[in-house]
Amino acid sequence: MLRVLAGAALAMLALAALDGCGSSSTHTAIHTASAGTPLVGTFRLTAGSCSGPSVTGTYFQMIQPGGTLAAGKYFENPDSPCANKSYTSGVPGRNGGLVTGSYQPNPVPAFSKTLSALADEILAPQSFTEIDFAISTNPRDPQTGLKVPAPEVYDSNGRLSGQIEAWSAAWNDQYFNQGSPKPNGTSPGLTSPLTGTYDASTHAFVLTWASQVVGGPFNGFTGYWHLQGTFAPST
């Protein structure tokens, strides 16, 4: 009887330790068990287009502090090619888009001499207030220094979910985590989960999430990300 009680106590302590550490691997294991079929491969991006009355494809918006996901108020990027300067269109990078199950890290160096960001695997660098910003995913988040898992996306009957903790924006020799959840597992402010849709017959997808900036010159602003394109499974 004593051995049974001791074993139960040890098991409870082990579970408590796992829960207390808040590790990404623990969150990932729970998510994997409940979210659906993992989509491992490349989410090939369709370039953002704002030639018509509405913006389509891949794009980014920044919501000002005090705003909402539904209505803004939005920060306007004077370098945007769109008539509505709150939209910054995205162009696929060298890998064609977002890879799940592995990282697409910053190059070395990560910035040019003029402080423009150089990462170009997911998206091509885009001008934002006269300085290029770029996107990467790294084993250790550049802003917080915390270890983060590679991006994961799951399909459940055409509804997508997952985590994108490692999504990092680089701009003007600075880093801004734009993942969801954040590297410490929290979702501050307007940060919202990764969601989307998926057509298994055509592989067409849409992925969206929001991530509030914590720290730095854009503290309190929120990035809204809209990725659209075609999923290509790993072979």
Image (cartoon, helix red, strand yellow):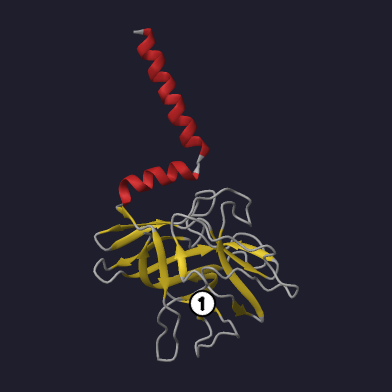
- In this picture, is 22 found above or below 67? above
Quarter of the N terminus within the rendering: top left
Task: Answer left or right for 146 relative to 101.
Answer: right
Residue at the image position 39 percent from the left and 67 percent from the top: 207
Estimate the x, y position of residue 229 in percent, counting from the top left: 38, 73
Q: Which residue is mark 1?
A: 73
Estimate the x, y position of residue 81 in percent, counting from the top left: 53, 88
Task: Answer left or right for 113 relative to 178.
Answer: right
- In this picture, is 54 found above or below 126? below
Estimate the x, y position of residue 26 in percent, counting from the top left: 44, 41
Task: Answer left or right for 39 relative to 132.
Answer: left
Query: Which residue is farthest top?
Result: 1
Residue at the image position 55 percent from the left and 85 percent from the top: 80
Secondary structure beneath disc 1? strand
Quarter of the C terminus within the rendering: bottom left
Disc tally is: 1
Q: Nearer the viewer, residue 45 or 190?
A: 45
Quarter holding residue 7? top left
Kind of residue at disc 1: Lys
Quarter holding residue 217? bottom right
